[in-house]
Image (cartoon, rainbow, N blue to C red):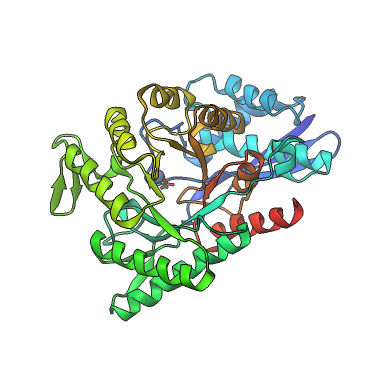
Amino acid sequence: RVTSVSLRRVLDSRGNPTVEADVLTESGGFGRAAAPSGASTGEYEAVELPPAEAIAAAREHAVPRLEGVYAGDQRAVDAALHAADGTEDFSAIGANAAVAISMAAAKAAADVLGAPLYQHLGGAFRGGNFPVPLGNVIGGGEHAADATHIQEFLAAPTGAPSVSEAVFANSAVHDAVAEILADRGVPAAKGDEGAWAPSIDDAEAFEVMAAATERVADEVGFTVRFGLDMAGAELYDADADAYVYGDRTRSPAEQIEYVAELVAEYDLAYVEDPLDEEDYDRFAELTDRVGDRTLICGDDLFVTNVDRLRTGIETGAGNSILIKPNQIGTLSDAVDAVELAVRNGYDPVISHRSGETEDTTIAHLAVATDAPYIKTGTVGGERTAKLNELIRIAEDAV
Ligand code: PGA
Ligand code: ZN
């Protein structure tokens, strides 16, 4: 049973404060976890409060309710967090405080059992699958100034025989992109997730990605495709009813045409948020057109929320959902979204945020839920923390 919950402010990868939680149990279990933070956040996400406010509110309302709760009963922990908050969107204690406590409690419970976190969360009937890592290697949008309009170009090593080979293939693509940009005389710094953020237009980024993934596929001897996070809600201008790419705009119909052409031309494995977060119908139209060849994933569309996913299932919008525990505030809610997705043929993609910490919970969550994909960057300590944990889990779990 939980005997104490302590909360503090720590740094995230952008140098901003975020919430870290420590959970202790009667039998000596200890768990520590920290909340990530988004920059291109969805309109319908659970609410992130300024960390100092979230900590004060959680100390007052959540901590007293958690004392005595059995940490091994994740649903009880997460129900206590919801009861302490009392709102639909964690606007009282902050989804950042909630998710840090929820994840720390799971780790404390795993510690009591002497089991790794993925084993505690996944249980004895977990499948033996490992996720394919989607690795951001070129990026712009809200994650870097003066770079591509499309937020993320992601390596997708779909043919990799193991997690470890997939992880190294993604870092090789990151490296190959740097070489190709240098050959073209294009300087490139890195954006928030460690992806290259060159001042090139999207068309050139597609050329670079095609060349880099082809080069690495030749080297490693398995299929390396690529995909996108278009962060459509950030591109979309509601007043103009158009997607804005600097000087040029695309109507919603043109946007669908554009994405369908990109999928065909580059054999894209994955397209996240190709359209605005309100536009279920056009998500459905695009899924109808290209969903048999590629994943059409909802991030800002679904925000890890089962009600929004249900609307997507009813309308046929997308065939994949991004799972970000901090978008919904607890591990139980995130797992509910995964389970609803899988039951309805949607592929779950467990995901980091652009602002991250060294926390590795999502690597364990991906393995625990048998998720086919994880999106957690390519380089940089807060990204490699998850990737290296996956490599360790794969070694441990065979
Ligand atoms: P965010 O971006 O973490 O800044 O929201 C990641 C994404 O859009 O997938
Ligand atoms: Zn996204």
For the residue pair 177 and 315, the one nearer the viewer reads as: 315
The image quarter in which residue 71 lies: top right
The image quarter in which residue 370 lies: top right
Measuring from the top left, give residue 24's x and y in whole percent.
77, 38
Residue 11 seen anywhere in this rendered image of the structure: no
The quadrant in which the N terminus is found is top right
Residue 202 seen anywhere in this rendered image of the structure: yes
For the residue pair 13 and 318, the one nearer the viewer reads as: 318
For the residue pair 42 and 129, the one nearer the viewer reads as: 129
For the residue pair 101 and 138, the one nearer the viewer reads as: 138
Measuring from the top left, give residue 177's x and y in whole percent.
39, 70
Q: Quadrant of ligand 2?
A: top left
Q: How many marks?
A: 0
- At 86% from the left edge and 36% from the top edge, which residue is drawn? 27
Measuring from the top left, give residue 321's x and y in whole percent.
46, 37
Which residue lies most toward the right here?
Answer: 27
Q: Is residue 171 left or right of residue 114?
A: left
Q: Is residue 65 left or right of residue 287?
A: right
- At 41% from the left edge and 68% from the top edge, which residue is drawn? 214
The vertical placement of 10 against 274, above or below, is: below
- At 50% from the left edge and 55% from the top edge, which residue is drawn? 158
